[in-house]
Image (cartoon, grey):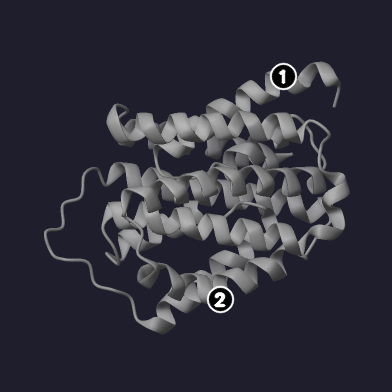
């Protein structure tokens, strides 16, 4: 990648982090979608997306902790197997001929989940959330952890719709929970992929600054001003187009 492209990409990553953070996500699928459009190599995409996702998720987790909205009792059943399975997934490197179709499917699935959560509109259920059984939470965390670790997608974009669809937590609890899940799983997957850290793009430090600023701005805007439903629909369309491009070649 030419050095002249680093700054425009930083601006694009800033916007991705801002939009994702405004709906309680860290942005890995967005970073991967952009890098896929620009023809990045699979190893560069995976490691860079995990590093960017890790930082934005850390910011989100810190904000939820500061606001007193984070309950570790809700987090640990998903993280118990999510962390080791993300570590395992991070150590798995798919060949390009398989990586791009798999990531394409992941992006399309993320688009479907994002659209579903948007079209559900405002929370209509009056009943209190039903906490999942311990085994259900373990299995959910493990499956999403392995898939997200293998592809570099973080996992929160899949976990949040599952939790909301099953009424396992309120919307606010889900946002806090997925921020921590993204943080733990991105860190685990990045550790698992340590053998390929040398493949990270040289401009990554600049992009980390950009997503940090975008993550903070998005969290503030999302909590005060921006319509959650419309943003989720826009994100779903972006992910769908990017995933279809990877699948169709």
Please say if 226 is above or below 82: above
Left or right of 224 on screen, residue 142? right
- Which label was assigned to residue 7? 1
Decide if residue 198 is in sight here: yes
Residue at the left extreme of this rendering: 126
Decide if residue 155 is in sight here: no
Q: Residues within 10 Å of mark 2 (few under 14, many from 20)?
A: many
Separation of marks 1 and 2 at Cα, in angstroms: 38 Å
Going from the N terminus, do you reach mark 1 or mark 2 first?
1
Label 2's element? Answer: helix
Please say if 51 is above or below 187: above
Q: Residue at x 16, y 66 (%)?
A: 128
Which residue was labeled with disc 2? 81
Q: Residue at x 72, y 19 (%)?
A: 7
Q: Residue at x 47, y 34 (%)?
A: 216
Measured as percent of width and height from the top left, residue 166 is found at 31, 66
Q: Quadrant of residue 88?
A: bottom right
Q: Quadrant of residue 173?
A: bottom left
């Amino acid at each position: 990648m030419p050095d002249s492209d680093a700054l425009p990409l930083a601006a694009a990553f800033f916007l991705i982090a801002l939009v994702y953070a405004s709906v309680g996500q860290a942005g890995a699928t967005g970073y991967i979608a952009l890098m896929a459009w620009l023809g990045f190599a699979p190893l560069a995409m995976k490691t860079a997306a995990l590093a960017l996702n890790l930082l934005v998720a850390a910011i989100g987790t810190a904000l939820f902790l500061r606001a007193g909205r984070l309950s570790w009792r809700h987090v640990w059943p998903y993280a118990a197997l999510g962390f080791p399975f993300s570590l395992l997934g991070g150590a798995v490197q798919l060949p390009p001929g398989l990586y791009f179709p798999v990531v394409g499917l992941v992006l399309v699935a993320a688009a479907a989940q994002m659209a579903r959560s948007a079209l559900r509109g405002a929370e209509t259920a009056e009943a209190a959330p039903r906490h999942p059984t311990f085994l259900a939470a373990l299995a959910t965390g493990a499956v999403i952890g392995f898939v997200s670790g293998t592809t570099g997608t973080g996992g929160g974009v899949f976990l949040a719709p599952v939790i909301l669809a099953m009424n396992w937590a309120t919307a606010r609890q889900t946002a806090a929970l997925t921020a921590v899940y993204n943080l733990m799983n991105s860190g685990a997957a990045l550790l698992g992929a340590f053998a390929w850290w040398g493949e990270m793009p040289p401009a990554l430090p600049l992009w980390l600054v950009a997503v940090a600023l975008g993550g903070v701005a998005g969290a503030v805007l999302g909590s005060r001003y921006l319509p959650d439903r419309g943003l989720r629909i826009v994100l779903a369309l972006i992910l769908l187009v990017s995933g279809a491009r990877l699948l169709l070649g």
